[in-house]
Amino acid sequence: MFLWGTATAAYQIEGATSEDGRGPSVWDTFSHEPGRTSRGQTGDVACDHYHRWPEDVALMEGLGVNAYRFSIAWPRVLPLGSGQVNAPGLDFYDRLVDALLAAGIQPVPTLFHWDLPQALEERGGWLNRDVCELFAGYAAVTAERLADRVPLWITLNEPFVHMAYGYAMGVHAPGRALLTGALPAAHHQLLGHGLAVQALRAAGARQVALTNNCTPVWPASQEEPDLRAAEAYDILHNRLFNDPVLLGAYPDLSAYTPEPDFVRDGDLATIAAPLDALGVNYYNPTRIAAPTGDGLPFDDAGISGFPTTAFGWPVVPGGLRELLTGLKARYGAALPPILITENGCSQEDVPAADGTIDDLARVDFLDRHIAAMRQAMAQGVDVRGYFVWSLLDNFEWAEGYDQRFGLVHVDFDTQRRTPKRSYHWYAEFLAGQNTDT
């Protein structure tokens, strides 16, 4: 069955950050630090999904999706990251899973979508190798409760973005600016993934996946310096997180570190545990030029000539086809089936006088990207699912509530949900789909 779905993340929608025994996460700490987020906004309430989840499940049922990708908040299940299990936290996800199944929607949980328990950050976060084992313990606890009803699990969401924004540049939680000193956070996330795969399967999970943010990398020119820079960026953004999982080896990291001394014997075998699917999040290509100063071995050259989203990201549907066929060409038989676990766009989405939101640009975005996905499938890429980001307007990390990605508009003062034109378009589209394609 082809999975047609939508997606969210715990810290972006749940709220209730201090209710029912939930511990603080790095995002609770980070968003409350002055200057870290747009207008000092936080996820304290977000979409209040923790209390309003029945309404949100009903919205998904009305949409006609057959799958829902959400994330489980590690600090809601294990407030300190390990040790005592918080029963009310697990109960919340238990109720959500049952409601989704009753609505004919397959739950697809992600175990880590950037909300590391603050207690673990105080022990070094993902720079501390011990967190890998603790992540596997959290995976085991969660799967032991839910794996009897949840067939497909995702370990990590976008470890590149979490490493780059959270540890290298400091613009996301936990706010560290270590540049290439962030590389151990990449390896430890991947090692935690591999250990979690073992724990999930031992607890009865039938299918396990990893979601990576991937981008086609375009050199600014065909001159050798730009080509070298593009290759270096492709290694950092794409291959650093795909090669160890699919090929059991890191790419050449000499542009970033003389010796990856954080890799120990046996790590790569653990990381390369067989997967049932690779999740791919796609938003846009990246254009790269040779560096103009010291530091990283590339510069982001920007992309012009395409329409842009409210975020300023270029809208390039053909990039999705390019990405998918490129993955197939690079990894061949080592590439498992692919799920497009996120694809969507931010738009202004100002309600009209009658309350409707006529987001035609988002409709066009989704229509063209689905067409590009199908072109890749026609070229032999094994894609098994497509999830729109996002079900709801939500807390968009450092951007606060300024960027709206949802199929459903949320008035954050009243929590009123209003389906947009894109919601109705997607519902009509899904009503005409054969679930096998």
Image: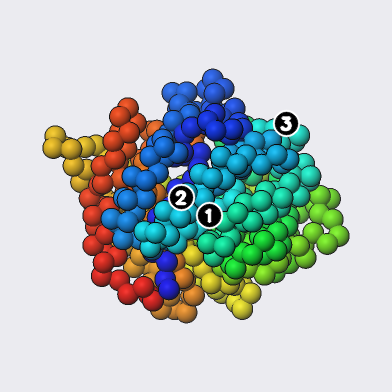
Q: Position of residue 92 (x, y in %)?
A: 51, 44
**Number of numbered discs visible in the structure rendering:** 3
Q: Is residue 66 above or below residue 17?
A: below
Q: Residue furthest top?
A: 34
Between residue 197 and residue 339, name the one nearer to us. Answer: 197
Residue at left 56%, top 41%? 89
Residue 274 in sight: yes
Residue 261 percent across, percent down from the top left: 84, 50
**Residue underneath mark 3:** 122
Res 109 label: 1
Q: Between disc 2 and disc 1, whose residue precedes?
A: 2
Circle 1: element type: strand
Tags 2 and 1 touching, CB below 8 Å:
no
Q: Quadrant of the C terminus?
A: bottom left
Residue at 29% x, 65% y is: 430
Left-right relation of 16 to 199: left
Mark closest to the chain's N terminus, 2 or 3: 2
> Disc 2 to disc 1, how far (Cα)?
11 Å
State which quarter of the image contains the N terminus.
bottom left
Kindly identify the amino acid type of the residue bearing the numbered disc 3. Glu
Tags 2 and 3 touching, CB below 8 Å: no
Q: Is residue 143 above or below residue 171?
A: below
Please, what is the three-letter code of the amino acid marked with disc 2?
Answer: Leu
Q: Which residue is mark 2?
A: 96
Q: Image check: 169 left or right of 394?
A: right
Gap in Å between the C-alphas at discs 2 and 3?
31 Å
User: Which residue is depicted at the point 70% across and 66% down?
Assistant: 273
